[in-house]
Image: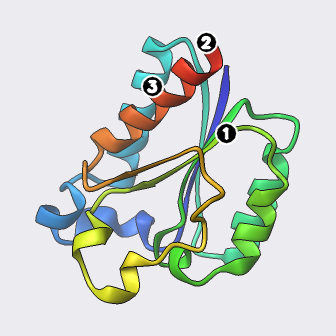
Amino acid sequence: MRIDVLNGVNLNVLDRRDPGTYGGVSLPELETRIYEWGSQLGCSIRCRQTNHEGDFVDWCHDALGRADGVIVNPGAWTHYSWAIRDALELVEAPIVEVHLSNVDDREEWRRHSVLEGLTAARVVGKGPDGYREALAFLVERAGS
């Protein structure tokens, strides 16, 4: 099973953000965990991160016909990027939206996701382990 993990804006400085909110890991540490979890589940993982919305859109297009599942954490783009939503609408594989923090318990503007209704699942507030849950969901869904 091939899974693309697409991380968006500001995830590259994850280790500089509030550890109580974001889990206290760096992006390389997070990606190492994701690759390990993927290996344990028999998945081929491709992790990508960008601060450039157009790159993120291009990576959504790259997933077309390639990925069996996509995990996305667009960061702040979650709340307003209709371009990312439009790009993900083309993806036929199941998509899981992940947020390290519990965006539903934070500022009002963070509670809205333009991806609502598009994703097969949404995982919030579980820190780095949210990615493991998303991987397991995709693997279980593929097996059913």
The residue that disc 2 covers is 143
Q: Residues within 10 Å of mark 2 (few under 14, many from 20)?
A: few
> Residue at coordinates 36% horizontally, 68% vertically from top-left?
13
Residue 37 versus residue 104: which sits nearer the camera? 104
Discs 2, 1 touching: Cβ within 8 Å: no
Outermost residue to the front: 117
Q: Amino acid at mark 1?
A: Pro
The residue that disc 3 covers is 136
Helix or strand or loop: what does disc 1 sit on?
A: loop
Q: Residue 73 location, x and y as percent?
A: 50, 59
As drawn, is 94 to the left or to the right of 73? right
Q: Quadrant of the N terminus?
A: top right
Q: Separation of disc 2 and disc 3 at Cα?
A: 11 Å
Helix or strand or loop: what does disc 3 sit on?
A: helix
Q: Where on the picture, by quarter, is residue 19?
A: bottom left
Query: Is residue 79 visible in this depiction of the protein?
Result: yes
Q: Where on the picture, by quarter, is residue 131?
A: top left
Residue 10 versus residue 26 in the image, above or below = below
The residue that disc 1 covers is 94
> Residue at coordinates 31% horizontally, 57% vertically from top-left?
100
Q: Residue 111 location, x and y as percent?
A: 38, 77
Q: Amino acid at mark 2?
A: Gly
Outermost residue to the left: 20
Residue 144 versus residue 102 in the image, above or below = above
Q: Residue 103 location, x and y as percent?
A: 31, 70
